[in-house]
Amino acid sequence: MESIRNVNRRRAGVIVSLPSIVSEYSLECGDIYSLYPLCDWAKDVGFSIIQLLPLNDTGFGYSPYSAISAFAIDPIYISLYKLNLNFKSRKREIRSLENHPIRIRNLKLDIIRKHYTENQKEAVKEATYFLEKHPWCYSYAAFRLLYEEFTDKGWWEWPKEYLDPNLAKEYIFSKRREEAFFWVYLQKIAFDQLSAVKTHYEDAGVYLKGDMPILTSRNSCDVWEHPEFFIMDLQAGAPPDDFSKTGQTWGFPVLNWEVLEKSNYSWWKDRLSYLENFFHLYRIDHVIGMFRIWAIPRADSTALHGWFHPQFGIAKEEFIKEGLDPKQFESLGLIHEFSPDHYIFYWDFWKEATYQELAEETKAKLFPLSELHIKEEEKHWKESGERILEIFESFSSMLPCAEDLGSVPKFIRESLFERQMIGIDVVRWTKSFTTGEFIPEESYRENAISVLSTHDTSLVMEWWKKEGDLESKFQFFFDRLGKPRPESDDEVVLGLLEFVFQTQSIFSIQLFQDLAIGVSDLWERPEKHRINLPGTPDQANWTYRFPILIEDFASDFKRNFTLRKLLLDSGRNS
């Protein structure tokens, strides 16, 4: 296969939620084996990148972005077929669009546990060797066993003897050794299977792209073992915007970059080194957070009282210099003392009634303080983010791609441009800053990935039919190009795929569902086929199952021919 240095050329790819892609050899949901027929199909059609959403162990949760380990692969992805265990899905025909991950995982664990018990001597030997090479699994196995035992509690609520990770690990691996080694054995199997997939893809000339969430669940092995790497009394989120008047609270603890730096970013280095066993490229989730992140008090249910972290803040002396007492404005709910004698101004504080009631002379002194350090803070954020990204690049030969969606500050966009880091352009949001209109293919960033949909958005057909002005879409994507207006849903999708593949973007990677030409249910009920709807309960998301086995999907000659021609005409065929 080409060197990873040669990945940087015009390519097309597919974004996949692995549990949704069921194979005839899967147990009810997609697993590592599903990546083999997916690779063969991709190679045949001309796709040369397969992008996977995170595969991390989600425990009793559903979202792979809220995993209980930054390293461990979810056992649900282990292929029983590759283990030579003869268990398949109950029916070849897929009748439900919904997986039941906890039930499927437990069923799979029972099957593998029986195999482990029957081959325990050899299994423990293999697990021991794996543990020596990957010491992170020592903590994970102990945590996972305790996590299973105390199902309704976070680790900070466990019995006192388990709050010290070192003592807990020593106890678990001495008193409950066989159980602990079972969880290590699961990771050994997953590692072997997924690293073998990478080799298969290299032989086929297809690249695998992974995903690295920037944040970590509070109830995770990583936070349990290294609470010093996190600011535990804060949670990450997003400030208020046009989509959410109260902002977003995510619950994840904020990263303590100062402590991470003192450890030479060892946690990140270990994470990237482990990912490289499986992937050639990786997506940096929420790259903005490498520069700064919206930090909110842990107990808050809205993001209104957050601030950009890290922040210098306004010193008490700077208030006094203006003849102002910061305690007065703190009592009015306008500012907050986030560190001794240093204050931040709340978001939209000037809209508060308590601010409006202030004397004009006081407002004239107070408001400028809120903007006092903006330039120097932006300079600090830019330098810090660039330093982190540069260090990340030194840790791995994988090609990093930045998820730079949302309200990205100008200084971060400039920084990513200067670093020539590949970003993401979602067609529905990529518009002219001056006119607000869609931009033509040749105006797209070359150093980016053009996409029609993401795992957090509606599918392209739902967007087409229900979001925004339909007439303007017809005019831009069809009339402008002199193409007849589509008369069917398939023709709409074909027109949009032709557009996105023709963009200047070096990569064009599409959600698997948006490529399902001829699968009428995806166009008639697109809302039933989306992966995640942000802001809704965890258990209502991340359970999607594609309605056709991957082998049957891959055998459709007409669809393959159509996609192959689109890639050939756009110069993206592998």
Image: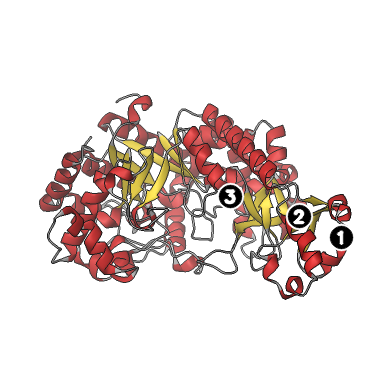
Q: Position of residue 431 (x, y in %)?
A: 37, 54
Whether residue 357 is visible here, answered yes or no, is yes
The alpha-carbon separation of the residues under discs 1 and 3 comes to 38 Å
Tell me if mark 1 has few (under 14), some (14-19) or many (20+) residues whose alpha carbon lies within 10 angstroms of its own.
some
**Proximity of marks 2 and 1: CB atoms separated by less than 8 Å:** yes
Q: Where is residue 173 in the image (x, y as percent from the top left)?
A: 66, 42
The mark lying in front, picked from 3 and 2, is 2
In the rendering, which numbered label is found on residue 215?
3
Tell me if mark 2 has few (under 14), some (14-19) or many (20+) residues whose alpha carbon lies within 10 angstroms of its own.
some
Residue type marked 3: Leu
The alpha-carbon separation of the residues under discs 3 and 2 comes to 31 Å
Using the rendered view, name the quadrant where residue 391 is placed. Answer: top right
Q: What element carries label 1?
A: loop
Residue that badge 2 annotates: 369
Q: In this view, does 190 lie above or below 542?
A: above
Residue occupying the point 49% across, 69% down: 536
The answer to which of marks 2 and 1 sits earlier in the sequence is 1
Q: Residue 261 vs residue 72: left or right?
A: right
